[in-house]
Amino acid sequence: MKKIKNQKGMTLIESTLTIMILAIGFLPTVTLMQSFMKKHVVPGYETEAYLLAKDRLEEVLVDKSFDGFSSVESELYSTDVVTQNGMNYTRTVNVLEVSSSDLSTPEVDSGVKLVTVQVSFDVGSEKTIQVQSVVTDYI
């Protein structure tokens, strides 16, 4: 094989090897990007979900303040979908009248309600954030 003086450019074999080396180096980069997304982007969505849950809980507490204890009922708060920064969040409110002694056993006319606001969103797998508060028939 005769060598050409002052050869410029790359041969097909050199080009193929370069592409293969770049492709092999690109795989760890993709893996790092996925890891970055899980560690840095998902917590941002979780924070947004928490803020949406707290916002709805504040609405319930304001309603109780203005309209009284009897106005705090699950049926009054419909499930809604909120879109923020390209993510859909589903908010639900559950109100359960509970025993004042353990705050978990259902008890009618106890004067104590457990309000649970749940916000769900999907980032490849469904995530749920939940906040709770207790409201009473007392001051």
Image: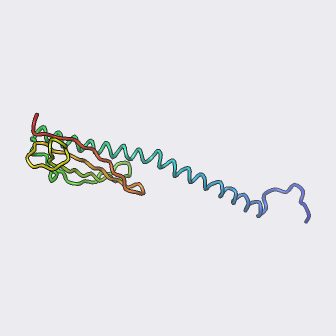
Observer-nearest residue: 25 or 126? Answer: 126
Locate residue 95 relative to residue 38 in the image: left or right. left
| Number of numbered tags placed on the structure image | 0
Work out whether residue 102 or residue 130 is closer to the camera in this orientation and state it. Answer: 102
Q: Residue furthest right?
A: 2
- Residue for point 18% across, 51% down: 77
Residue lying at the far bottom of the rendered structure: 1
The x, y position of residue 104, in whole percent, is: 20, 47
Q: Quadrant of the C terminus?
A: top left
Image height of 83 relative to 4, above or below? above
For the point 27% across and 44% down, the residue is: 131
Q: Is residue 54 left or right of residue 106?
A: right
Residue farthest toward the top in the current orientation of the protein: 139
With 4 as the anchor, is 84 left or right in this view? left
Which x, y percent locates residue 40? 46, 44
Give left or right: position of 93 versus 44: left
Please state, as top left, top right, bottom left or bottom right, where the N terminus lies in the image: bottom right
Q: Position of residue 70 (x, y in %)?
A: 9, 45
- How is the model colour-coded? rainbow
Residue 116's spot in the image, x, y percent? 23, 47
Q: Nearer the viewer, residue 40 or 113?
A: 113
The residue that appears at 10% across and 44% down in the rendered structure is 110
